[in-house]
Image (cartoon, rainbow, N blue to C red):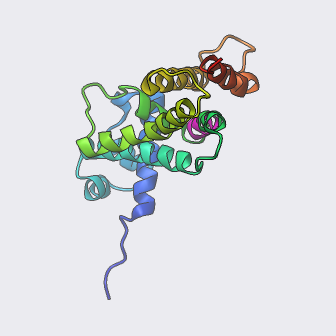
Amino acid sequence: MPRPKTHDDALRARLLHRAGELLSTEGPGALSLRRLAADVNTSTTAVYSLFGGKPALLDALYEEAFRRFGERLATLPPTDDPVEDIVRLGLVYRDSALADPQFYLVMFSKVVPNFEPSEDTYTAAAQTFVPLLESVARAIEAGAFVAEPQERIALSLWGMVHGLVSLELNGNLPPGVEIAPGYEQAIRAQVEGWRRR
């Protein structure tokens, strides 16, 4: 009878979750394989068995963060209204960040200096920008948006939602100010700025 598999996908997921927490709350100095293993109640051997070392762990963490983000974006199939699709993407962006704050910082900052994800992981990450680009292109083609380069419009829209979400997650808001009440309104105002008059 074969030995039970102890280094399984559930352990891998727990290790990635905790690694993201350590990086996002305490910084790169907190992420040692020994501490990570202890925090998840496993051995460093398990970490090496699943990831092969710290660089591969970091790459897997980056990949997992964008995989989850991409899956959430994929829950929004395109409709006949590309402008409304853009608003919905902005709402899912925030929902994703709030659901996995430990991965948000990993995705959108150089939390580990000098770390570069693998080419495959970087390519997969870039794919998460595609739904917004495609929706913007559809809005331009439909005559709903001005005839500007789709990348320029998409970057503007992304920058606005990214900025608001980052301020919220990092606690950089003035006392008594909340993002939630005006978040959708801010997206809609940005979208209206790109409307063809």
User: In terms of depth relative to the viewer, which is nearer, 38 or 10?
Assistant: 10
Q: Quadrant of the C terminus?
A: top right
Left/right placement of residue 112 relative to residue 108 reads left
Q: Residue extending furthest bottom?
A: 1
Q: Whole-percent x and y of residue 183? A: 69, 25
Left/right placement of residue 96 relative to residue 197 reads left
- Magenta span includes 94: yes
Asked if residue 197 shows in the view, the reply is yes
Residue appearing at x 58%, y 51% in the figure: 75
Q: Whole-percent x and y of residue 173? A: 64, 15
Image vertical order of residue 1 relative to residue 47, above or below: below
Q: Residue extending furthest top?
A: 174
Residue appearing at x 43%, y 26% in the figure: 151
Q: Whole-percent x and y of residue 136? A: 52, 32
Q: Which residues are magenta?
A: 91-97
Left/right placement of residue 100 relative to residue 30 reads right
Q: Quadrant of the N terminus?
A: bottom left
Residue appearing at x 51%, y 50% in the figure: 71
Quadrant of the rendered structure where residue 81 is? top right
User: In terms of depth relative to the viewer, which is nearer, 157 or 31?
Assistant: 157
Residue appearing at x 61%, y 38% in the figure: 82
| Magenta segment, prevailing SS (helix, strand or loop) | helix
Asked if residue 33 shows in the view, the reply is no
- Magenta span includes 136: no
Quadrant of the rendered structure where residue 29 is? top left
Image vertical order of residue 42 relative to residue 92, above or below: below
Q: Whole-percent x and y of residue 84? A: 66, 36
User: In terms of depth relative to the viewer, which is nearer, 88 or 31?
Assistant: 88
